[in-house]
Every structure is written in structure tokens, then in C-alpha cells.
Amino acid sequence: MSEEEKKQNEAAEAAEEVTAVSDAAAILAEDETQKTVDNKPKRSRVRSIPAGIAFIRATFNNTIVSITDARGGVIAWNTAGRAGFKGSRKSTAFAATMVAQDAARQAVAKGMHEVEVRVQGAGAGRESAVRGIQSAGMQVTLIKDCTPIPHNGCRARKRRRV
């Protein structure tokens, strides 16, 4: 009988292992279902921002448009490089128009309809970027030039030869 008892004990231990494995699998399955339930995307606060500031930086090589709220938090931005222009085409007035329209459309989608424009730099896209913002459906209340002008502070760069 001792051999029979050993066989019965072994069978009982094997059954316990199977139930333990199945219990572990059940717990893991519950964790997976909880993870899929908890993976809902968190809703970000969608607030309407009626007015803001559009910063246009028109350099000789690129045009950067950033649209912010009144406190300076960026709501929408775009550059000529991001819009798909490469090389010397980034510095054109057409690229500046496309960039400004795209940034303005992003801001309009978030509820902005009135903007104050601050232009910086001496590039080709200064005026065309402002026109692009207007054509996207935004009302421009103010256009301000914020280009830094030295009052004969430090020595200027050498003259550009074109």
C-alpha cells in the first residue's frame, strides 16, 4: 500500500500544481483586462482661447511662426522646414505664407479667432506671413515690429556679399 499511497500523493501534488498554474494564469488574465480597461486616453482640458499673440520670426534662411495665448504658452507653431520646404525655398515669401496659414488653422481649431502679431527679423516672409494669418480666418488686431536694433553696442558682423 505504500506504493499506492505514494502514487496518490504524487497525483494530488500534480493536481495542486495544475490548479496553482491555472490560478496564476487567471490572475494574469485579470491584470490584462484591467490594463486594457485602464488604458483609456485621458481627456485633456479642451479650452477655447479667443485671443492670443502670433510671433513671426523671418530670418534670411527660414520663417518660424508661433501662436501663443496671452500668457505665452504655445498653442500652435510651424516652420518652413516642418512644412516640407528644403534649402533656399525655406526663405521664400510663399513658404512663409504656407507656414503662417497652417499655424493659424491649428489655432483656429482650438478656438482662437483674434491675434496680435509681433514680427521679428528682416527675411522675405515678413508681410506674407501676416497675410497668411489673415487669410486663415483670424482677425489681426495689432502688428508690431520687435526686431532687435543695436544702439551701437557690440561690433556688427562683416558685410554680406551677394
Image (tube, rainbow, N blue to C red):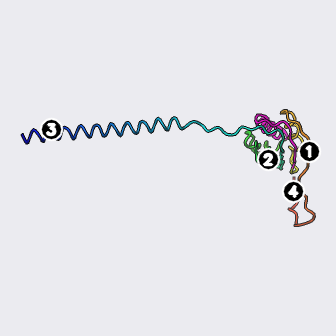
Q: Is residue 152 left or right of residue 111?
A: right
Find residue 50 and report its image quarter. top right
Dot 1: what SS? strand
Foreground tag (2 vs 4): 2
Q: Quadrant of the N terminus?
A: top left
Q: Which numbered disc covers residue 62?
A: 2
- Which one is earlier in the sequence, the residue at label 4 or at label 1? 1
Kindly identify the residue that appears in the image at 41 percent across and 36 percent down.
29
Tags 4 and 1 in contact by the CB under 8 Å rule?
no
- Which residues lie in the magenta part? 93-119
Foreground tag (4 vs 1): 1
Q: Amino acid at mark 3?
A: Gln
Dot 3: what SS? helix
How far apart are the alpha carbons under marks 1 and 3? Answer: 91 Å
How far across and how far down the image is residue 121, in percent? 86, 51
Q: Main secondary structure of the magenta part?
A: helix
Foreground tag (3 vs 4): 3
Dot 2: what SS? loop
Q: Amino acid at mark 2?
A: Asn
Q: Which numbered disc covers residue 8?
A: 3
